[in-house]
Image (spheres, rainbow, N blue to C red):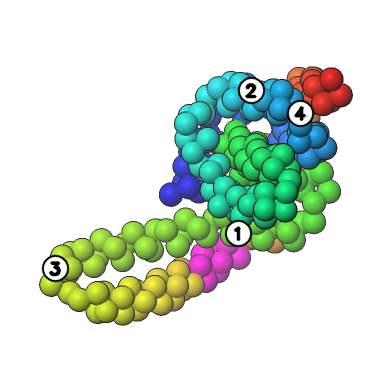
Amino acid sequence: MHHVLLDRWSQGTSPLHRRDARAKILALLVFLVVLATTPATAVAVLATYAALLAAAILIARLPLGGVVTRAMVVLPFSLTFALIAWLAGEPLRALALVEKSYLSTVAVLLLAGATPLSLLLGGLERLGSPRLLVLVAQFLYRYLFVLSEQAQHMRLAASCRDSGAGHRRGSRFRAATGALAVLFARSYERAEGIHRAMLARGFSGRFSLLHAPRFGARDGAFLLLVSAFLILVRLG
């Protein structure tokens, strides 16, 4: 599943993984700003942004094909708005909409794949993001694993009971809807148990890191160099 794969990617040891989450978040914000303000006719500039992202993916030792493929999830949405712009007589704007939305998605995937979630959310909180929002994001992400685990257990149990041969399509649909209801009921029960266990262990509404990361000179240099390069490309 996508969240499991991202979690595996984020455990790497590349130079990009070792940079402080705050530096990478701020670098992403600079990239998104310069990308959004780049004219639709600046094809060479957009190609430079794409080359920079490809280089960063290789430096982070992430699978280039995996990141590029998974970023395509945004294309159905961006193509819809691009079609509207194309029919309105603005083909350059339509093309730029697809390119910018896709590059933005690749950049976000790069950040998520090169930063463990706990450090990423901790960096957002230290940069001033609301703690409640960070806490909700942490729970949403972690409970995806609870949901996927329950789904795998139910799929294995169903496979052991019946191969599914000879069932009509309608009966399969009813069985699937019933299984979905059971899945959410079991996941809710499991989540309640996890919450009680967290409270029993002293959870106070905040996830604490064992080792608080420090924003060092290398992190500052990384942010400065990336920001300067992006601004120079944009102005050039």
Label 3, on which residue?
A: 165
Query: Quick one: label 3 or label 1, which is nearer the N terminus?
Result: 1
Q: Amino acid at mark 4?
A: Ala
Q: Residues within 10 Å of mark 1 (few under 14, many from 20)?
A: few
Q: Which is nearer the eye, 8 or 51?
A: 51
Label 2, on which residue?
A: 51
Label 4, on which residue?
A: 42
Secondary structure under the numbered disc 1 in the rendered image: helix
Which one is in front in this view, the residue at disc 4 or the one at disc 1? 4
What residue range appears in magenta? 191-201
Q: Which residue is found at the position 56% from the left and 52% from the top?
A: 76
Q: Amino acid at mark 1?
A: Phe
Query: Quick one: label 4 or label 1, which is nearer the N terminus?
Result: 4
User: Which of the labelled discs sits on residue 139, or is there none?
Assistant: 1
Which one is in front in this view, the residue at disc 2 or the one at disc 1? 2
- The C terminus: image quadrant: top right
Q: Horizontal and vertical percent for residue 105?
A: 63, 42
Left or right: where does residue 31 sit relative to residue 2?
right
